[in-house]
Amino acid sequence: MEIRKVTAVYFSPTHGTRAYAEGIAGALSAEYEAVDLTQRAVREREHAFGADELVIIGAPVYAGRLPAVEDLLARLHGEGTPAVLLVSYGNRAYDDALLELKDLCEAQGFRAVAASAWIAPHTFSAKIGAGRPDERDRRQIGEFAEAVRALLAAGVPEGAQLSVPGHRPYCPVKVMPFHPEADGRCIRCRRCVAACPVGAISPEAPEKTDAAKCIDCLACVHACPVHARDVYHPPLAQIGAGCEEHFLTPRKEPEWFLIGK
């Protein structure tokens, strides 16, 4: 199979998934394109891909599922387009997220030919997954890309289906009982408004968060130049310490799956 174009498509509020999606795309083509679904304006546009293209589609894992973003992939359209799927997670588990991504992509006209799961920094801890992707991960990105390249060169087996871990029905979506907000240090620069991928922060009241919309990705916390935004009830440090107790070690390594293998 000859591929005319490679595109990395990802939802990546804190850039962990982006690093892997663009890393894989770059290993497959020096001239890949990128579609950042983290931006609401990009998600609202239609994106069509032909049968002679390859699309790398990635998303982070939140409590074993994909982010609860309405119509996350609804405007991606494939025509039997081969797709390489990936999820990134904070050294705990990816549970049903990779299977959920596969189901969503196939419903949009893509043919999943490979899939993978990678470790990225944990949303609630600066220690879990710190520095990843690291050099070992980057070597494995190259190895995975070579395996995908060889698969496509040999031809995807007729009628074969990609098998990935996970269960249907998927595990329930976990709604966090806390959300980031700003304290008195807020300078109303509204960088948090621009960073929020789901419109949970109003320009008129940037110190607040719409709990009904917030997905607790903490993109706003990372974007705040004066460190005014944080999770305060309970404190993020307390939440992170609890995660570190269970998920800091042992180091998990990437997993990948190829169609017909």
Image: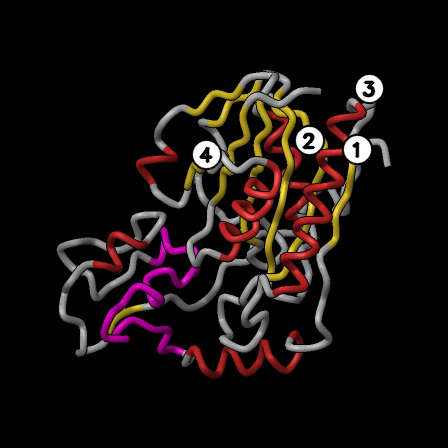
- Disc 2 is placed on an element classified as strand
Q: Quadrant of residue 205?
A: bottom left
Distance CA(mark 1)–CA(mark 2): 8 Å
Asked if the residue at tag 4 contacts the one at tag 2, i.e. Cβ–Cβ closer than 8 Å, the answer is no
The magenta segment is: 211-233
Earlier along the polypeptide chain: callout 4 or callout 3? 4
Q: Tell me the number on the disc at residue 33.
A: 4
Earlier along the polypeptide chain: callout 2 or callout 4? 4
Q: Which quarter of the rendering shows the N terminus?
A: top right
**In front: mark 2 or mark 4?**
4
**152 left or right of 109 in image:** right
Where is residue 123? Give x, y as percent: 49, 66
Q: Tell me the number on the disc at residue 259.
A: 1
Asked if the residue at tag 2 contacts the one at tag 1, i.e. Cβ–Cβ closer than 8 Å, the answer is yes
Q: Residue at x 76, y 40 (%)?
A: 147
| 212 is within the stretch colored magenta | yes
Task: State the residue position of label 3.
Answer: 159
Q: Residue at x 67, y 55 (%)?
A: 94
